[in-house]
Image: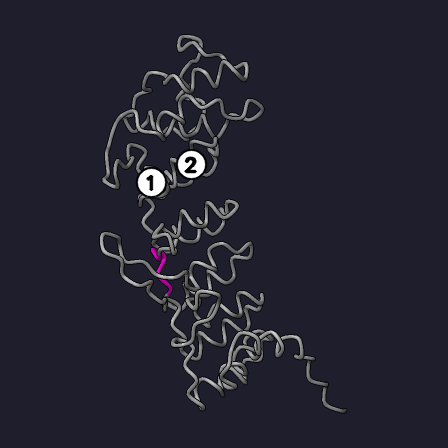
Amino acid sequence: MPAAPFADTSNEQALAARRFEDPGVRALAVAAATGDAKTVRRLMQDEGIDPDVVFWGSSGGIPLLVWPIYRSNPDGLKAMLESGADPNVARPYPREEGRSDTNHSNAMVWAAEQEDSVYLEMLLDHGGDPDTRNANNEALLFHAYIKQNKWRNVQILVERGADVNVLAGMGGTIVSMYAGRGGFMMVHWLLRQGADPTLDYAYGKPVHAPDATTIEAIFWHPGDPDDPSWQVACQQWLLARGHSRPPMPRHYREMRQTFGFPHEEGRIPLPDMDETGEGT
């Protein structure tokens, strides 16, 4: 039987040639982009091409390890990682007085914003840091959230050890982000993973309060009138752990009134703790 013909790599070769000057690096980029694991191993392990010192992009800060993610080839990423590529390598931005040190976005950041979670899981399997920060010095959890709500990636990061109570956005946490948009299925899952509903941040410092953003949203956000079950489950979770319903804040009163929901506290009952087992 004749050998199968090699896949046409001309497009990948042309693209790599526009990005990388070194012929060995170009060959590694093409092999990773096409999932040619044998060539990746040869170039990295036998010829000594080190992807951890190669960066590309308009700012010159994207690690070569991002290339197979950019080209949508998990096999290429796996081959690079198995050959010793560092999932956490990142190029620092130049230091600026009065500002925190930050890095260009690395492979972990790129993977966290992908629809397909295979890249993120693969990097984590090879030692990727779930608490990596993006180029704006924001938590990876928040990065996955703001990139079109990659909920599965948020879950994976939490399951792999990311700090679920880290600052996420302007004064919030990942659970308060979901609570504020009425995503109570996500809120319930995060609470069960250790998210602190009393936690907000003020000027970057943690602040605990009985009327924190998450708690107010769980009790007063209009939620989904067609299926309030997850919001009720969150309320039961809070009540079972000694949290009281705070007074309704003005913005939720106005929101409820605008959308035709009851907006007087006396007309909004607390959930029956005997209805389900979620409150225990």
Q: Please tell me whether mark 2 sits on a helix, a strand or a loop.
A: helix
From the viewer's perspective, is 119 left or right of 167? right
> Is 67 situated above or below 99?
below
Dots 1, 2 in contact, CB < 8 A: yes
Query: Image height check: is 120 above or below 235?
Result: below
Residue lying at the far right of the rendered structure:
1
Q: Residue at x 54, y 65 (%)?
A: 70
Q: Is residue 132 above or below residue 244?
A: below
Q: Which numbered dot is residue 278?
A: none
Badge 2 is on which residue?
Answer: 187
Q: Can the viewer see residue 49?
A: yes
Q: Measure the alpha-carbon separation of dots 1 and 2.
A: 9 Å
Q: Decide: few, some or many residues near mark 1? Use Cα within 10 Å; few <14, some 14-19, many ≥20.
A: many
Per the picture, the main secondary structure of the magenta-coloured stretch is loop
For label 1, the SS is: loop
Q: Which residue type carries mark 2?
A: Val
Q: Is 253 or 20 nearer to us in this picture?
A: 20
Q: Residue at x 57, y 69 (%)?
A: 73
In what quadrant of the picture does the N terminus appear?
Answer: bottom right
Residue 129 part of the magenta segment: yes
Q: Amino acid at mark 1?
A: Ala
- Whether residue 280 is visible: no
Crowding near pointer 2: few (<14 within 10 Å), some, many (20+)?
many
Q: How is the image coloured?
A: one colour
* In-image side of 128 versus 182 (left or right): left
Q: Position of residue 100 (x, y in %)?
A: 26, 54
Q: How far from the left and from the top, in percent, is residue 81? A: 44, 74
Q: Position of residue 82 (x, y in %)?
A: 44, 76
Q: Check residue 195 in the rendering and tell me which mark sits there, or answer none.
A: 1
Tell me which segment is drawn in magenta: 128-132
Q: Is residue 72 magenta?
A: no
What is the quadrant of residue 193 in the picture?
A: top left
